[in-house]
Amino acid sequence: MGTATVSQFPAVSIIIPAYNTSGFVSACLDSVFAQTYRNFEVLVVNDGSPDTAQLDINLEPYMSRIGYWRQENKGTAGARNRAILQAKGEYLAFLDSDDTWIPQHLETQMSLFADDPALDLVYGNGLIVGDSSHHEFMARCPSHGEATFESLVVERCQPSISTVVARKACLVRAGLFDESLRRCEDYDMWLRAAFHGAKIGYTRRVLATFNTGRPGSLGELRVKMAHAYWRILENAKRNLPLSESQRTLVSQRADQIRARYLCEEGKCRLRARQFGQAREYLREANQHFRSTKLSLVVVGLTFAPEITRKGVELFGGNA
């Protein structure tokens, strides 16, 4: 379908992947068209969504102002890449279709580029909603000091994608989003961009609202996120020409994340009463953690698995 833009020569291309978010997309787009900064185009990619019929109905009032494409499901990386290849803007602004921006989002981020023309990518804070309490993203995922490749590796700086605005050229230089990744593909993108020289800045101002109220098992999500993070670090070791110090840092962090993944997988198996598998995952994780509590859980799973499971649940799963 054709592209209609707010500006004939947009400075910013807004990238919105859509998958099973028909109930949120109107609020998302309303927040886009409420922006105080107006020189943009809007690109929505339907990534093989199962709710396409309702999505199309909800998008109809916006069709004259957006570019819209449908594709077979490729994941958010594939959807974002599709939009990037169509983008006319020098800058790319990313927004998930179940998130929203405050009206000053683009104005704030573009002012960071104006203040420091050397910047290639900027991000900000957000308000996480949908669970029992609302909290700021940076309260749990803080950013401290300069945002570099090294600080991204150890998560001292953590960009949230629905606040990111980046120069298109810096993401193209880094190779765009990795479509083989189904999770944490944004983290992988920022990591590679930083490695290839992107200068990153950020603001602590709350610029967006992130919706986390969609269904899913928190435990399973932690397993999948940790596994994806570990895989990304292993890819970095394998594919990037790292310096010796960078390789050491990435290797150490990969070992930490692998242990985290094994621990989360073990706890999921424990909840499922798959005691033998839980014991093996937790035993292997503890080769890194060297935790007395985890050692006791492993022993308990050998001799009294059901009692051990109840004990772990009683203490909130903090083995």
Image (cartoon, helix red, strand yellow):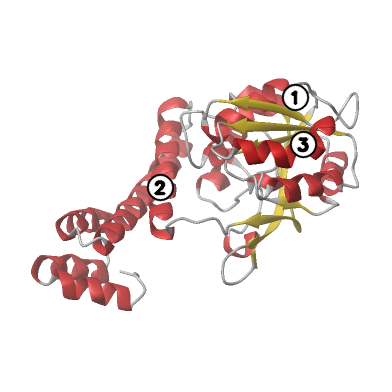
Q: Name the residue under label 3.
A: 60
Q: Mark 2 points at which residue?
A: 224
Quadrant (top left, top right, bottom left, bottom right) of the C terminus:
bottom left
Residue kind at label 3, given as amino acid type? Glu
Decide which of 92, 171 is in the foreground and name it: 92
Residue kind at label 1, given as amino acid type? Ala
Q: In this view, does 213 lie to the left or right of 256?
A: right
Q: In this view, does 215 lie to the left or right of 30?
A: left
- In the rendered view, would you say 161 is above or below 236? below
Judge depth for marks 3 and 2 and give the one in front: 3
- Label for residue 122? none
Q: How far apart are marks 3 and 2 (CA)?
A: 35 Å
Q: Residue at x 48, y 30 (%)?
A: 242
Q: Residue at x 14, y 68 (%)?
A: 299
How far from the left and from the top, in percent, is residue 18? 63, 38
- Number of other residues with Cα within 10 Å of mark 1, as a class: few under 14, some 14 to 19, many 20 or more: many
- Label for residue 87? 1
